[in-house]
Amino acid sequence: MTKIEAIIQPSKFEAVKEGLQEIGVDGMTVTDVRGHGRQKGHTEVYRGREYTVDLVPKVKIEMVVPDELVEKAINAILNSAKTGKIGDGKIFLSRIDDAIRIRNDERGQSAL
Amino acid sequence: MAMTVMSRRGALLRTFLALVILTGVLTTAATAQVTSPAAQDRLAKLEKDVAQAQSAGDNAWMLTSSALVLLMTGPGLALFYGGLVRKKNVLGTMMHSFALMAIVTVLWAIIGYSLCFASGTNFIGGLGHVFLRGVGGAPDADYAATIPQQTYMVFQLMFAIITPALITGAFAERMKFSAMALFMVLWSIIVYDPMAHMVWGKGGLLNASLGGRFPTLDFAGGTVVHITSGVSALVCALYLGKRLGYPKEPILPHSVVLSFIGACLLWVGWFGFNAGSALAAGSLATSAFVATHFAAAAAVVGWGLAEWLRNGKPSALGAISGAVAGLVAITPASGFVGPMSALVIGLIAGIVCYLMVAKVKAAFGYDDSLDAFGVHGAGGTIGALLTGVFAASVVNPVFKDSAGNPTAVGLIEGNAHQVLNQLVGVVIAWGLAIVGTLVILKVVDIVIGLRVAPEHEVQGLDLSQHGEEGYNLEY
């Protein structure tokens, strides 16, 4: 089981969600986050002073998928989220030790 | 020959006399019909009805105005200031305004009204109206002859409430609530009441309508409300010191949306503030209403253009601040100047107050958090002086010669001296505010301490002073 963490542009979220659902990824956790990589923020002016706002709004999608589905999921995300410009985001993968369904105590891949 | 002339003259005389008598009889007969007891009764009743209608119209407007001015504090100013602070301080900031609505009212009822408006000295009122003794349904003709004195009292109360509330903008996000409450009680008595008495009270040194020695034209409170509060605000900002992290860290408004709503409520409420200061529902109220609105509009244009030129974009916060600056500046002038002058006053105030908050504040480095001095202190001073320039007898014949004819009021009309009188009022307001506020700050600092502890400032006033959070949006 692999955890896929994708940080994407907020405007691409609907497309990414649909793309993932099409390939069979049912469960995901979505958070509104702020951050930056190489993308610069913007300047605001308040009472004559300029302020640089470094952090940019993004959306983080977390999902745990069976290993067989990982490459398909990554491609689905890349196809929907890419614009080719700085600020598109990143995908991180990590190993998951176990998964448990709270409703019926099911464990392992069938809990996904 | 002499006999013929005499008899002709006699005949003429007799005819003349007959005509006179006949006219007299006919006139008396006619007059007797009009001044019969029944007709006299009807005339008297008619005059009473007209006076009552006038009174009813005036009182309705004055009560409405009082409500409008209270609306300016709550929620107008509460929202305007509340939106400009960080989320963790929103309730604390609103509580400043709201607590004053309560505290100042109680103080007013006990002693405030008396110190402002009872007969006393040139500088402060007496104790004749303590506990509102003598303040009832009958008008006080010196102040407002067609409305109950109680209406006048409650109208003035709303001014006494908003004035200290304006100061809270200077020490936002770092003042102890207990210290603020004590400070405001003392400030109301030591600074506001004397200033209000001098400008508006019987025997006041600066009272233009009741024969003050230095008649300062202040229609709705440019000196009494805006200069005193704005300058006191500066003193507070300097005494308390800067907020932690200012100016290096960006301390940005958490909701310009709230401030926007507050500013609009202030604009509309200001019609009660200025037009209500006509103390009647006649054409002077209309004139003040129009001048108020025009000045606000011109100031939005002034501030907006200045900001657009300097920063490349006109901000929403700048636009609403511009409106407030224009409204402040027109406050002393509103019942004395015409609409075109109001446009000019507003335009000047918009530009100058923009420079005050965008350049002067940064240059001097003081942390007047919500620009109480930049807008109210500066705007009030500009407005008070420009009143001496633009005031016109055709709008409000405030000065009359010994024959009762109106004479020139302001500089443009031909009375250069009035600007000097305005300056006297301005200087007294500045002086009273500075000295009074410094003394009070020192006393309160010694007795309870003014500023919250650094960890409480970081935690936020909502939690540290009130045990609450403004927003629990997760729930």
Image: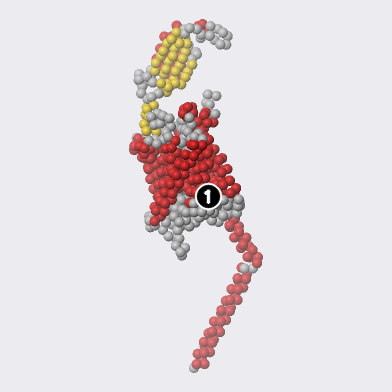
Q: Is residue B312 visible?
A: yes
- The residue at the far front in this view is B446
Residue at the (39%, 18%) spot, across then down: A89
Q: Is residue B200 visible?
A: no
The one nearer the camera, B286 or B254, is: B254
Three-letter amino acid code of the residue under disc 1: Cys
- How are the residues colored? secondary structure
Element on which disc 1 rests: helix
Residue at the (55%, 40%) spot, across then down: B103
Q: Quadrant of the C terminus of chain B?
A: top right
Q: Position of residue B474 (x, y in %)?
A: 53, 24
In the picture shown, does residue A108 fall above or below B20?
A: above
Residue beneath label 1, please? B116
- Marker count (numbered): 1
In the picture shown, does residue A88 fall above or below B132?
A: above
- The residue at the far right in this view is B38
Judge left or right: residue A56 versus residue B90: left
Q: Position of residue B269 (x, y in %)?
A: 50, 43
Dot 1, how many residues are within 10 Å of its Cα: few (below 14), some (14-19), or many (20+)? Answer: many
In the picture shown, does residue B410 fall above or below B80?
A: below
Which quarter of the picture shows residue A52?
A: top left
Residue at the (53%, 35%) spot, across then down: B178
Q: Position of residue B371 (x, y in %)?
A: 43, 38
The one nearer the camera, A55 or B212, is: B212
Q: Chain of mark 1?
A: B
In the picture shown, does residue B177 fall above or below A64?
A: below
Residue at the (53%, 6%) spot, across then down: A107
